[in-house]
Image (cartoon, rainbow, N blue to C red):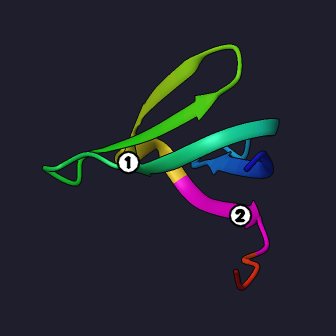
Amino acid sequence: MIYRLKVVFVDNEELILENTEKHGFSDDLELFELTTSEEVFVIPLKQIKYISCDAKIFKP
């Protein structure tokens, strides 16, 4: 599933990804990991103000 994800940083800069494949937190809950069709992002949670996800869940 491909979906839109928006990350707003503490300095109010925004990262908007239209082709996110998956996202989640690291095991130690210090990093936020994003995977798109082109690249992988690893962002320290201390730099993130909030995350907005535009995904829908469909029942099988």
**Mark drawn on residue 7:** none
* Residue 2: quadrant of the picture: top right
**Region of the chain picked out in magenta, as a range:** 49-56
Which amino acid, mark 2?
Ser
Which amino acid, mark 1?
Leu
Name the residue at 53% across, 21% down: 40
* Residue 31: quadrant of the picture: top left
Residue assigned mark 2: 52
Name the residue at 16% across, 50% down: 27
The residue nearer to you, when weighing 35 against 8, is 35
Q: Nearer the viewer, mark 2 or mark 1?
A: 2
Name the residue at 67% across, 48% down: 7
Residue at the extreme bottom: 59
- Rendered view: 4 above or below 41: below
Helix, strand, or loop for circle 1?
Answer: helix
**Mark drawn on residue 45:** 1
